[in-house]
Image (tube, grey):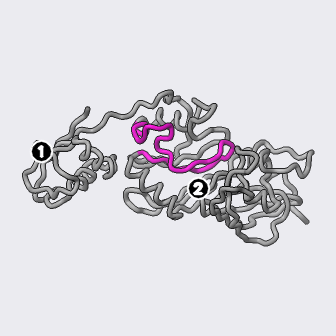
Amino acid sequence: MPKSEFLVSEESGAGERLDVFLARRMPEHARAEFQRLVDKGRVKVDGALKKSSHKLRTGERVEVELEAAAELPGLRPEQIPLNILFADPDIVVLDKPSGLVVHPGAGVRSGTLVNALIHHFPDIRRLSEDERPGIVHRLDKETSGVMVVARSRRAAEELKRQFKDREVRKVYLALVWGRMPSPTGRFDWSIGRHPKHGQQMSIRTKTPRSALTEYQVRQEYRDLSLLEVRPHTGRTHQIRVHLSAAGHPLAGDGRYGSVRNPKRRFPRLFLHAHRLSFRHPATGAPLEFVSPLPPDLAAVLASLETPE
């Protein structure tokens, strides 16, 4: 097991809690991780075990024995190209292509975003013992667009908190059938598992969870509308379910959509994560990233007729 030692000085560490001291000096690890190491007896102060709340004194020597990175069964790095928009020791922001599954799951063991991430950024692998290291939110396989991934434990914890507390702003571009009843609107219908089709979500469910989606019409076409959609919650398939329930399913949605024009074909689900805004998990600085509409969806818009 790798070990690290630190000497407490009057200028650096004196008076700090033990767990805070370690988190400040090893920011790639979260404070909670050091608390667990203290509880396991892997942290010593002058050779003695102390509590996480121990206040350090000048001259004390702190020794910490880190745990080895977990080897995840069946999870292997794969050289899959990624479009990286930003990367630093805490986060990676990328533009996910359509067709890429975010993490391994039932029936999918390779070729995922996680497999690509641990190839390009091996440090992500140690963030958890499951098959979702670094993943703090997801996009459906068919959905393209901007995503943020954590590279450190503190970043993962803080980003999950921001998503949970609805501090992250997400804006999608969605092409839907028909005309919306007003230029702006909102759906606050609860969502849960479909009572008969367990792989689908529905507003008619026995296990409802609150869900809120806002939209703004960006462009109207003859029989379709391009929307900017902002989900305030992160329920599975939320945008697709809400728009379908409103009578305006997404173009190309084979699961929740209905065929309005059998002669009209779309290359895929028309849903793109266009903009993502959040605060940097380490510095608190506001960040915003934009992913332009990819060529296949841009070509769809170019082929549509606008009303006269």
Residue at 39% in and 46% down: 152
Q: Quadrant of the N terminus?
A: top left
Q: From this view, report whether residue 56 is shown above or below residue 94.
A: below
The answer to whether 178 appears left or right of 124 in the picture is: right
Label 1 packing within 10 angstroms: few (<14), some (14-19), many (20+): few
Tag in front: 2 or 1: 1
Residue 290 is tagged as 2
Q: Position of residue 153 (x, y in %)?
A: 38, 48
Q: Nearer the viewer, residue 67 or 179?
A: 67
Label 2 packing within 10 angstroms: few (<14), some (14-19), many (20+): some
Q: Amino acid at mark 1?
A: Ala
Residue 48 is tagged as 1
Residue at 47% in and 55% down: 160
Q: Position of residue 112 (x, y in %)?
A: 58, 35
Q: Position of residue 267 (x, y in %)?
A: 78, 42
Measured in 3D between alpha carbons, the distance from the residue under mark 2 to the one under mark 1, in whole angstroms, is 51 Å
Please check the rendered image and state whether residue 201 is part of the magenta-colored stretch, yes or no. Answer: no
Residue at 24% in and 50% down: 22
Q: Nearer the viewer, residue 186 or 178?
A: 186
* Residue range highlighted in magenta: 123-151
Residue 12, quarter of the rendered image: bottom left
Q: Quadrant of the C terminus?
A: bottom right
Q: Amino acid at mark 2?
A: Val
